[in-house]
Image: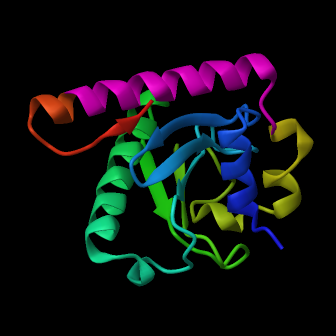
Amino acid sequence: MECFACKRIKMIKEKTNPYFVKELETGYVVIGDYQHFKGYTVFICKEHVAELHQLPYQFRIKYLEEMSVVAEAVFRAFRAEKLNCELLGNCDNTHSHWHIFPRFSDDMPKKGPVWLLPREEMYHMSQKPSEEELKSMVSKLKNELNELIIDSVMNEKNINIIE
């Protein structure tokens, strides 16, 4: 049975995933399906492993480096006050993927982690972006990623984009 992340990667390769933003050396950047937290992004590892320590060391270091660049791009693109970056795997525990949530002081009734929000509210159909909103979000995030990658190349860091 194909895992959720592998299905998403397959859609990216088939060019049928409208949430796809960018392919990096170690993973795929996608906008989250539900946007209660505007700019919610997922960074899916190219390797099908459940845990970071299962990745070869050099790949793992690169994956973490790229995740931090994706997080910074999300922060900049969606003007977050704070970020929550989580690698949980409690529901899809077979394929490593980062959840990157832009956070704002008024995004929840009470301060706390995003997972305190009732599931029916977080995953309500009203939280799915319209086609226009999604295109705008993809464009904003792609622009920030491109800018950060160009900056990292100019500063001799080693972040590579796959076109």
Figure label count: 0
Q: Which residues are magenta?
A: 128-150
Image quadrant containing the N terminus: bottom right
* Residue 140 sits inside the magenta stretch: yes
- The residue nearer to you, when weighing 141 against 96, is 96
Task: From the viewer's perspective, tell me whether residue 151 is left or right of residue 120.
Answer: left
Residue 7 is drawn in which quadrant? bottom right
* Residue 131 sits inside the magenta stretch: yes
Q: Horizontal and vertical percent for residue 14?
A: 72, 38
Task: From the viewer's perspective, tell me whether residue 125 is left or right of residue 7.
Answer: right
Task: From the viewer's perspective, tell me whether residue 150 is left or right of residue 36.
Answer: left
The image shows residue 79, relative to residue 160, as above or below, that is above
Q: Main secondary structure of the magenta part?
A: helix
Q: Horizontal and vertical percent for residue 121?
A: 84, 53
Residue sitting at x 17%, y 33%: 153
Q: Please identify the residue farthest to the left as the structure is shown.
A: 155
The image shows residue 64, relative to residue 159, as above or below, that is below
